[in-house]
Image (cartoon, grey):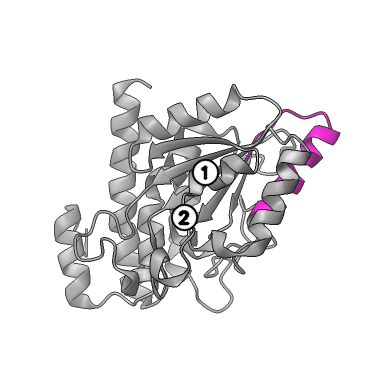
Amino acid sequence: MIKEKVLQINGLCNQFRIDLIKLLHSIQTGHPGGSLSSAEIITALYSEIMYYNHYDPNNPDRDRFVLSKGHAAPMLYLNLAHNHFFPKEDLKTLRQLGSHLQGHPCAHKTPGIDVSTGPLGLGLSAGLGIALAGRLQRRSYYTYVLLGDGEIQEGGIWEAAMSAVKFQADHLIVFLDHNGVQLDGTNEEIMPMGDICWKFSSFGWNVLTCNGHDVEEIVNAVEKAKKTKNIPTIIVAETVKGKGVSFMDGKNIWHGKAISAVDCELALKELGGALNG
């Protein structure tokens, strides 16, 4: 990647963090922690990696994205609005009655959403189905899935993991937002998963790792994944829950805590933003 592009995406991520804090403070609901940890992954996908056209959101040859950890929808919506899938003004209606921007993505209402998600553990199966449909239709698109690391405690993830290897789904590329924290505590406290890389490798996956807050590493990992044939790839992206706001970093209480006026001011100061800016 050229340096200018990396700087551009990093700048976008910081702006999205500012916008997210202001937005969730204004509506007093939402999920800041996991949205902040996934900023670079989602933004790199939409700004550098995926093929799509907002003028033709249903183009059959477009790449697909499944936000399996659906509570991180605010970060996805910020990217979709930035890329002209819907007006930025719509963001103010997040999680409001009648809005097309619900707390979890809805494919029936929101332009740019490929799969409705919410119940954790379903997105990998959906992504696998989309990838295999592309093969049957002789299309070359890639399907990207973003999993949460608390989510992979769900049994359905491992059924899909077995199936993806059996069906040689090499156009399925999965990101694991590996921030180590879930709703009620750390992953180790709630349900230890052991060596995640070893687990997926033992299932037959191509396993890559990267710093999930380094755009260049994210893009390079995808490029490596595309060179691997006949097996699916998972990219274990090491991240920090609440990344960018020091008092949120690694704290499970910020999984879904409302942002107070004081916390909003402190967060924006750290991020270089202003409440009315």
Q: Are marks 1 and 2 in contact (CB under 8 Å)?
A: yes
Q: Estimate the x, y position of residue 83 in percent, counting from the top left.
A: 49, 43
| Three-letter code, disc 2 | Gly
Q: Which mark identifies residue 198?
A: 1
Q: Is residue 130 left or right of residue 248?
A: right
Does the segment drawn in magenta span residue 135?
yes
The x and y percentages for residue 156 are 68, 61
Q: In this rendering, is residue 226 above or below 17?
A: above
Residue drawn 45% across and 61% down?
74
Question: Which residue is denoted by mark 2 in the rendering?
Answer: 194
How many numbered discs sit on the rendered protein?
2
Q: Which mark is residue 187?
A: none
Q: Is residue 57 positioned above or below 249 on the image?
A: above
Q: Is residue 249 magenta?
A: no
Say which quadrant the N terminus sits in: top left
In the foreground, 104 or 250: 250
Q: Is residue 90 visible?
A: no
Residue closer to the observer: 129 or 76:
129
Around disc 1, counting alpha carbons within 10 Å, would you say few (fewer than 14), some (14 to 19), or many (20 or more)?
few
Three-letter residue code for mark 1? Trp
